[in-house]
Image (spheres, helix red, strand yellow):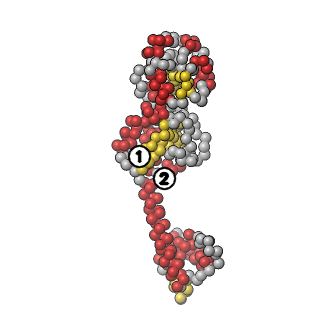
C-alpha cells in the first residue's frame, strides 16, 4: 500500500475514469488510443498502488465496488479541473491581450520603436508592451524579458534568434561642432577631434577607428556617459562627435556624417526570444512585427 503522501499516477487514474465513462475496457481503450491490455494493466496497477479493489467482474462486465465509486467521484472532479487547466492554457496561448516585455538599447527605444508601437496598438489594442530601455544584455532565459533586440549574436541555449538586416555606423556631428572645431577632410583630421565616450570604455571603438586610419586614442574622449540617448543628444547639440547606426541618425534632424568617405562600422542586429514564441500568440505578434521592420533595409 502507498504511503499517505504518495500520489497515484495520473495516467492510471485517467484510465480508470475513461473505463467508467465508456462502460468497458475496450471502449475506454478506443477513447484513449491505447490497447485494451495496456489499459487493463493501468487499472490493475492503480488498484495495487491504492490497495483497494475498484472493479468486480460480473460476467463479462465490470461493476464498481463501493471504494471504487468513491474514488471515481473524486476523479471526476480532478478530470474537470484538468480540463479547465487545459482550456485556460489554450486561451492564454491564443490571446493577444496581455503584457510582452521587450528589452532594447535606449537609443533604439527612443528612435526606432515608436512607429512600431503605434502599429502594434492598431493591431492589438489589448496588448501592453513594456520596454526595458537598457544598454546591458537582459537574460531571456530567466525571463527578464520576452524579446530582445541585440547587436551581438546570443550564445545561450534555449533561445530563438533571428538575424535582421545589418546596419552601418558612421561618425556624426552637428553644424555647431564643425563651425567650432572644423570639418575633417581626411581620416588624419580626426586626430584632435572630441568624441563622446562610454562608461565601459572605448577600446573597441578606438580599435575600429584606428583600422580605418583614424588616429584617435583615450585623450579624444574627454566625456563619457552610460546613456546612449544622452550621448547622442550631446552630438546633436554640437558638444562632440559620436558614432551612431544610420537607422537612428536618419531619424535625427541636425546631424551630419563627419567624413562620408570613411568606411562605416558594420553593426549586426539580432531579434531574440525564448521558446514560448511557439505557444504564445502575443509574443509571436510582437516578434513578427519587429522582425519585419528590422529586416527592411533603408
Q: Between residues 200 and 188, which one lies in front from this camera angle?
A: 200
Quadrant of residue 136 within the rendered picture: top right
Q: Nearer the viewer, mark 1 or mark 2?
A: 1
Q: Is residue 292 above or below residue 248?
A: below
Give the mark nearer the N terminus: 1 vs 2.
1
- Residue placed at 48% from the left, 74% from the top? 76
- Residue 260 is situated, as x and y percent measured from the top left of the image, at 49, 17
Q: Residue 144: horizontal and vertical position, in percent?
A: 53, 45
> At 48% from the left edge and 37% from the top edge, which residue is drawn?
133
- Residue 205 vs residue 24, the one in the foreground: 205
Q: State whether residue 181 is above or below residue 46.
A: above
Quadrant (top left, top right, bottom left, bottom right) of the C terminus: top left
Tag 1 near tag 2, CB within 8 Å: no
Q: Which residue is mark 1?
A: 128
Identify the residue at horizontal 58%, vertical 39% (top origin).
154
Q: Residues within 10 Å of mark 2 (few under 14, many from 20)?
A: some
* Above/below status of 106 relative to 56: above
Whether residue 21 appears in this view of the structure is yes
Q: Please tell me the numbered disc located at residue 279.
A: 2
The residues tagged by marks 1 and 2 sit, at their Cα atoms, a distance apart of 18 Å
When the figure is inspected, residue 163 is found, relative to residue 204, above or below; the finding is: below
Amino acid at each position: 500500500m502507498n504511503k499517505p503522501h504518495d500520489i497515484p499516477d495520473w495516467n492510471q487514474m485517467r484510465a480508470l475514469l475513461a473505463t467508467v465513462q465508456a462502460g468497458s475496457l475496450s471502449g475506454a481503450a478506443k477513447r484513449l488510443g491505447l490497447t485494451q491490455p495496456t489499459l487493463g494493466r493501468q487499472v490493475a496497477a492503480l488498484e495495487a498502488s491504492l490497495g483497494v479493489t475498484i472493479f468486480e467482474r460480473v460476467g463479462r462486465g465490470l461493476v464498481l465496488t463501493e471504494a471504487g465509486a468513491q474514488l471515481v467521484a473524486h476523479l471526476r472532479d480532478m478530470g474537470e479541473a484538468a480540463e479547465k487547466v487545459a482550456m485556460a492554457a489554450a486561451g492564454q496561448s491564443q490571446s493577444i491581450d496581455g503584457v510582452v516585455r521587450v528589452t532594447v538599447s535606449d537609443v533604439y527605444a527612443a528612435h526606432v520603436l515608436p512607429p512600431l508601437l503605434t502599429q502594434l496598438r492598431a493591431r492589438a489594442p489589448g496588448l501592453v508592451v513594456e520596454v526595458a530601455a537598457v544598454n546591458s544584455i537582459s537574460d531571456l532565459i530567466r525571463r527578464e524579458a520576452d524579446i530582445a533586440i541585440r547587436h551581438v549574436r546570443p550564445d545561450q541555449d534555449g533561445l530563438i534568434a533571428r538575424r535582421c538586416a545589418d546596419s552601418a555606423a558612421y561618425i556624426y556631428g552637428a553644424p555647431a561642432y564643425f563651425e567650432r572645431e572644423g570639418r575633417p577632410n581626411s581620416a588624419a583630421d580626426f586626430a584632435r577631434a572630441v568624441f563622446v565616450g562610454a562608461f565601459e570604455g572605448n577600446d573597441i571603438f578606438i580599435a575600429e577607428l584606428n583600422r580605418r586610419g583614424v588616429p584617435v586614442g583615450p585623450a579624444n574622449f574627454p566625456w563619457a556617459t552610460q546613456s546612449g540617448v544622452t550621448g547622442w543628444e550631446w552630438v546633436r547639440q554640437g558638444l562632440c562627435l559620436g558614432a551612431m547606426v544610420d537607422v537612428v541618425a536618419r531619424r535625427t534632424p541636425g546631424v551630419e556624417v563627419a567624413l562620408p568617405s570613411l568606411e562605416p562600422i558594420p553593426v549586426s542586429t539580432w531579434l531574440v526570444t525564448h521558446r514560448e514564441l511557439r505557444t504564445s500568440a502575443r509574443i509571436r505578434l510582437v516578434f513578427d512585427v519587429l522582425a519585419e521592420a528590422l529586416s527592411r533595409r533603408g
